[in-house]
Image (tube, grey):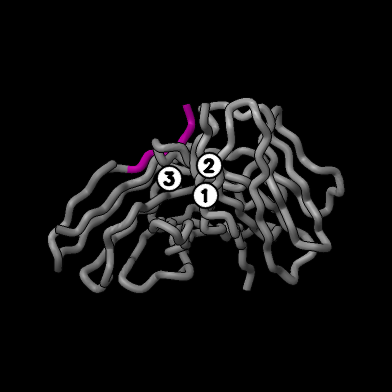
Amino acid sequence: AQTVTQSQPEMSVQEAETVTLSCTYDTSESDYYLFWYKQPPSRQMILVIRQEAYKQQNATENRFSVNFQKAAKSFSLKISDSQLGDAAMYFCAYRVIYTGTASKLTFGTGTRLQVTL
Amino acid sequence: DGGITQSPKYLFRKEGQNVTLSCEQNLNHDAMYWYRQDPGQGLRLIYYSQIVNDFQKGDIAEGYSVSREKKESFPLTVTSAQKNPTAFYLCASSTTRARGPDGAFFGQGTRLTVV
């Protein structure tokens, strides 16, 4: 079974600084997606960034980037120039790629990010 | 605008009663999912459906039931057999294409409290 581990229950960063959230996963599959979701106090799940396992290039979305290490099964999220609006729970998620079927997401336990002035 | 609508936002239930959470999507997605969120445990999959009139159990299906009579709708019933139903419930949908553009779209959730 696939598992996703986020070992940092809470992190804190000063505004404008950079922070990295860690995620490791376990799978025997070779083709899959990895995601980072943000859940602000409204509790709406928002997709931040995704990575396809077959792509060696790390994904970036504005101030958000990932460090994907497939051999190490590691998928960390880097937030640059942190803003107060980045304060939220962040979930790492995994899904295997199957054609024509529902692709269930497996989530980590989350990291609560605080942004301070 | 396309999206997923969950209702109600807050729900209170007396012990021993069944309660149904609504989830509707207009994204034309084939697949729909129900997740439960508890503090410190992330999101756990309850049930999912790939197509109308078909659904499968997730990791924590005991005490729950679902139906999928329409593509747009995937209601979740929390039965009296669920021992600890107080939680935040999230509905999601996705395509069944292997390389879809997003993991899943989520509704805004329903907070269920047993009183």
Residue at 46% across, 37% down: A40
Nearest to viewer (mark 3 / mark 2): 2
Q: Quadrant of the C terminus of chain B?
A: bottom left
Residue of label 1: A10
Left or right: where B53 falls relative to A64: left
* Numbered range of the magenta stretch: B1-6
Q: Amino acid at mark 3?
A: Glu
Asked whether A50 or A31 is in front, the reply is A50
Q: Earlier in the sequence, mark 2 or mark 1?
A: 1
Q: CA distance from mark 1 to mark 3?
A: 37 Å
* Tag 1 and tag 3, C-beta contact below 8 Å: no
* Tag 2 and tag 1, C-beta contact below 8 Å: yes
Q: Amino acid at mark 1?
A: Glu
Asked whether A84 or B58 is in front, the reply is A84
Q: Position of residue A57 (x, y in %)?
A: 85, 43
Nearest to viewer (mark 1 / mark 3): 1
Q: Position of residue B69 (x, y in %)?
A: 38, 55
Left or right: where A27 falls relative to B59: right
Q: Position of residue B61 (x, y in %)?
A: 40, 70
Q: CA distance from mark 3 to mark 2?
A: 34 Å
Residue of label 3: B72
Question: In the image, is residue A16 part of the stretch drawn in magenta?
Answer: no
Asked whether A7 or A40 is in front, the reply is A7
Local secondary structure at mark 2: strand
